[in-house]
Amino acid sequence: MALVDIPGSKSITARALFLAAAADGVTTLQRPLRSDDTEGFAEGLVRLGYRVGRTPDAWQVDGRPEGPAVTEADVYCRDGATTSRFLPTLAAAGHGTYRFDASPQMRRRPLLPLTRALRDLGVDLRHEQAEGHHPLTVTAHGVDGGEVTLDAGQSSQYLTALLLLGPLTRTGLRITVTDLVSAPYVEITIAMMRAFGVEVGREGNTYVVPPGGYRATTYPIEPDASTASYFFAAAAVTGGEVTVPGLGRGALQGDLGFVDVLRRMGARVDIAADRTTVTGTGELHGLTVDMRDISDTMPTLAAIAPFASGPVRIENVANTRVKECDRLDACAENLRRLGVEVTTGPDWIEIRPGTPEAADIKTYGDHRIVMSFAVTGLRTLGISFDDPGCVRKTFPGFHEAFVELRKDIVG
Ligand SMILES: O=C(O)C1=C[C@@H](OP(=O)(O)O)[C@@H](O)[C@H](O)C1
Ligand SMILES: C=C(OP(=O)(O)O)C(=O)O
C-alpha cells in the first residue's frame, strides 16, 4: 500500500498566478506546483514587473489591477502553453509593449483563435513569424470589452485566457464559443474566478464576464490530478494500492475522472471527501472510452492498455496531436517499439493486448510520454527513455517518486 504525496496542480497554479497578479491586494498561493511550467509563469510575471515572493510552500504575489508595472518587457514562456496563452492576454489589459517568445516545442503549438479574438477586441497584437504562433508582441492600451466569438475546439486554454481577461476590461466580455475541448478545465477557471470574487454567467454557449476586477485571497492548490494518473494506473496494473490525499470528491480537476476509466477496466476505486484510493484487482478489461474531457490522461491509458485482456480504444482525442508532441503518433510509435499491436486514426488510437518487451522510449521532449511509459516499466524490464529529464515540465521529482512507489507496491 502506498500513500503518495502528489505535487500541486499545474493548471490551478497557473490560473492562481494570473488571478493573483490581476487582483487588488496581496495573494498567497499555498502549496503551488514548483516545476518548469509554473516557475516559467512566475518568472514571466516578474519580467512584467510584478512582485512574486517564493518560498518552498507558498508563493506571494502583489496584485496590480492596472496591469504590468513596466512599459516594456521581453518574456520567455519556455514550454508552457498556459504561460504562452495566459500571459500575453494579461499583458493586453495593461499599457506598454510586451514581447513574448517560447521554446521551439511551444512555438510549434497553435494560438491563432486566441490572438484573433484578442484582435477582434481591439488588441494590437503582431506575430513575428507564423500567424498564430510565438513569438508575438502586444502593444497594450487596456481592453474596452464587448462581444467576441471563439473556436475552442483545439484548446480550451483560449477560452480560459479570455475568461480571465474579462474582469480586467472596461465593460466586461461576452464570449460565444462555437466548439470546446477539455471542458472541465473551463470549470476550473470559473470556480477559481469565483474564489477571487468574480461570478461568470452563462447563456447557452455564451459566457458573460462582468467588469470590476478581482479580489486578492489565500488560495490552497490541489495536488495535480493528471500527475496522480500515473500512480493510480500503477496500482491498477500491479495489483497494488495507491492513495492520494488531497484529491477527493470536491476536487476541481476533471482529470481525477481517470479513476472512473480504471474502475470500468476492473480496478477498485474509492473516492472519499479528501482522498482517492485505487486498488488493482488482477483484472484489467479492455474498453472503448471517449477522452475528450480528460485527454492529458490518454497516454497514461495507452501505456497500460497492452496489459488489458481485450482491446483498448480511445476516441475523440484529436487535440492530443497539438500538445508537447503529436501524442497519438508518439504513443503508437512507442507501443510498436515495445512490440505491441496498435492502430490510429485522426482522433483515436486502438491498442491490442500484448506483452511489452524491453525498448528505448522516444520521448519527443514530452513529460507525459515519460511518465506514462514508466508505468509500463513496472511490469516490463528494460524500458529506458531518450530524455527522462523532460518530466521537469510538471514534476521534476517524478523518477525519485516512482522509485519509492515501486518499492512500496512492487517490492
Ligand atoms: O487550461 C489548462 O490548464 C489546461 C488545459 C488542457 O489543454 P487544452 O485545453 O489545450 O486541451 C490541458 O491539456 C493542459 O494540460 C492544461
Ligand atoms: C498539454 C499539456 O500542457 P500545456 O498544454 O499546458 O503545455 C500537458 O501538461 O499535458
Image: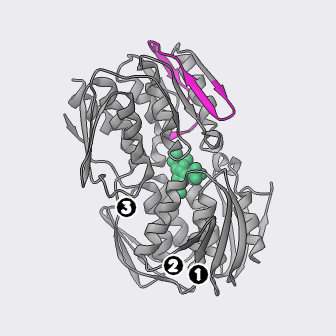
Q: Are marks 2 and 1 in contact (CB under 8 Å)?
A: yes
Residue 396 visible in the shown view: no
Q: State the SS at label 1.
A: helix
Q: Label 3, label 1: how many angstroms apart (C-alpha)? A: 24 Å
- Disc assigned to residue 22: 2
Q: State the SS at label 2.
A: helix
Tag nearer the camera, 3 or 1: 1
Where, quadrant-wise, is the N terminus in this rendering? top left
Q: Position of residue 376 (x, y in %)?
A: 41, 24
Question: Could you tell me how many numbered marks the image carries?
Answer: 3
In screen coordinates, is 41 left or right of 127? left
| Residue 210 belongs to the span the image colors magenta | no
Residue 30 visible in the shown view: yes
Range shown magenta: 344-367
Where, quadrant-wise, is the C terminus in this rendering? top left
Query: Considering depth in this image, is 407 or 312 the residue closer to the camera?
Result: 312
Q: Position of residue 265 (x, y in %)?
A: 38, 28
Q: Label 2, label 3: how many angstroms apart (C-alpha)? A: 17 Å
Q: Which residue is mark 3?
A: 32
Query: Considering depth in this image, is 41 or 225 the residue closer to the camera?
Result: 225
Question: Residue visible at 71% across and 76% down?
Answer: 147
Q: What is the three-letter code of the residue carrying label 3? A: Pro
Q: Are marks 2 and 3 in contact (CB under 8 Å)?
A: no
Q: What color scheme is it?
A: one colour
Question: Residue visible at 39% across and 17% down?
Answer: 380
Q: Which residue is mark 1?
A: 168
